[in-house]
C-alpha cells in the first residue's frame, strides 16, 4: 500500500484538488477521491455477473461509459467545489 497505492492516491488527490481549486487536504477533495475511484474500482474488481445485477441496463461500451462518467464526475466536482469555496 505504501509503495503502490499511496503515491497514486496522492497524485489523484493533487490533480482533483487543482481542478476543484481547493487545497489537496480539503475534506471535499478526499470525498471526491472516493466518489471518483469507487465506480472505477467496481468496474475493475466486480465480475460481469455482479455488475449486471447492480446495473442491469448498463452499456459497457467503453466510449459511452467513459463519456458518461467524465460528464458526471466533472459536474459533481464543480458543484461540490463551488459549495466548499463559498464556505458551505
Image (spheres, rainbow, N blue to C red):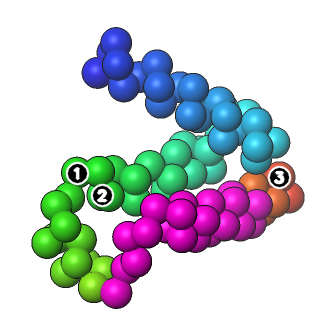
Q: Residue 54: horizontal and vertical position, in percent?
A: 25, 78
Q: Give the range drawn in magenta.
A: 57-79
Vertically, is 9 above or below 37?
Answer: above
Q: Residue at x 70, y 38 (%)?
A: 17
Instruction: Residue lying at the far top in this picture: please name it.
Output: 3
Label 3: how many Cα within 10 Å (few below 14, some 14–19, many 20+)? few
* Residue under label 1: 45
Q: Residue at x 66, y 41 (%)?
A: 16
Mark 2 element type:
helix
Q: Which of 60 and 42 is in front in this view?
A: 60
Quadrant of the image containing the C terminus: bottom right
Q: Residue 74: horizontal and vertical position, in percent?
A: 69, 60
Q: Nearer the viewer, residue 32 or 59?
A: 59
Q: Look at the numbered discs 1 and 2 and tell me whether their residues touch, using CB distance below 8 Å.
A: yes
* Residue under label 2: 42
Mark 1 element type:
helix
Residue 85: give its label: 3
What's the distance in space between the residues labelled 1 and 3, CA to CA? 34 Å
Q: Nearer the viewer, mark 1 or mark 3?
A: 1
Q: Residue at x 19, y 81 (%)?
A: 53
Label 1: how many Cα within 10 Å (few below 14, some 14–19, many 20+)? few
Q: Look at the numbered discs 2 and 3 and tell me whether their residues touch, using CB distance below 8 Å.
A: no
What's the distance in space between the residues labelled 2 and 3, CA to CA? 30 Å
Amino acid at each position: 500500500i505504501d509503495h503502490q497505492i499511496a503515491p497514486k492516491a496522492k497524485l489523484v488527490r493533487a490533480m482533483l484538488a487543482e481542478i476543484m481549486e481547493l487545497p489537496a487536504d480539503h475534506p471535499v477533495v478526499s470525498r471526491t477521491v472516493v466518489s471518483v475511484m469507487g465506480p472505477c474500482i467496481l468496474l475493475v474488481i466486480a465480475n460481469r455477473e455482479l455488475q449486471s445485477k447492480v446495473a442491469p441496463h448498463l452499456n459497457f461500451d467503453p466510449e459511452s461509459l467513459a463519456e458518461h462518467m467524465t460528464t458526471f464526475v466533472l459536474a459533481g466536482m464543480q458543484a461540490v467545489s463551488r459549495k466548499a469555496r463559498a464556505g458551505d
